[in-house]
Amino acid sequence: MKFDRLSAVFGALASAFVIGLFGTWGSTAGSLQAQPISGDPTVAELQRRVQELDSAAQRAQVITVVYQLDTAGLHDIDESLQAGSIPSGALGRVRRARIVAQSVMWPDGLRTTATQLVGQLTQLESALRDEDVERARGPAHAAHDGEHDVSDQAYAWLAASPAIAAPSPSTVSAPGAQPSMPAATEEHDDHDHDDHDHDDHSDHSH
């Protein structure tokens, strides 16, 4: 139970962060991509970087939401309903799964399957709210299978996506930007690190 709660909290926080990040940069990406690329290499480089960030944000969003769907417990909910009972906490888990599933800007190849899953979760949520086991059985099984389909398709899409290259130093900077400062060359004092490590271990021991 404790693990489930920690997973739910982690997934919710991660989803909120990624969805917020994706929304912010999505508007920026749309603005820059709408502008024609001029011969200025600075503009072309900035647009390329924004496109890479847009792609990375979408992947992060899909990964986070699929993780939440995979850990929503739809398998157990389906089995319990088929056996004639509503498991404790089922309504909340289904509701959260429906909310995150409909909050994603899904890639084209996943959008149809994900939309179907949202519909199945919506029907299941309604039946669970009414505590109607008989009406919940059909959408519970459909949502269980639908979640597997979304998960499989999402990981196939991620596997087929180009790998994200590690950022490399570039001399191209935004117009008006200050030149980057050289990396610090001061040597770190090993004794300072040892003191901090000692303090950290002491704190954890109490």
Image (tube, helix red, strand yellow):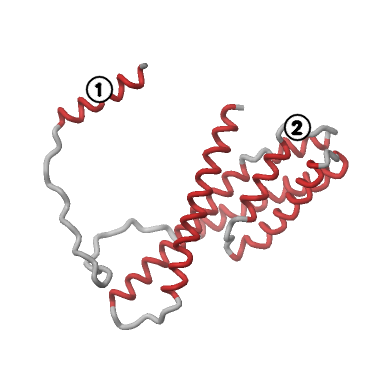
From the viewer's perspective, tell me whether residue 60 is left or right of residue 201. right
Q: Quadrant of residue 9?
A: top right
In the image, 193: left or right of 157? left
The quarter of the displayed image where residue 182 is located: bottom left
Instruction: Please name the residue shown 24% across and 71% down the image.
Output: 176
**Would you call the spot at circle 2 few (<14 residues within 10 Å), some (14-19), or many (20 or more)?**
some
Q: Quadrant of the C terminus?
A: top left
User: What amino acid type is highlighted by mark number 1?
Assistant: His
Where is mark 2, residue-wise? 87
Residue at (30, 25) in percent of width and height: 200
**94 to 27, vertically: above or below:** above
Percent position of residue 88, x then y: 73, 31
Question: In what quadrant of the picture does the N terminus appear?
Answer: top right
Q: CA distance from mark 2 to mark 1?
A: 47 Å
Residue furthest out toward the top: 206
Q: Position of residue 16 (x, y in %)?
A: 52, 49
In the image, residue 133 lies at what x, y percent? 85, 39
Which numbered circle lies on residue 190?
none
N-term mark: 2 or 1 = 2
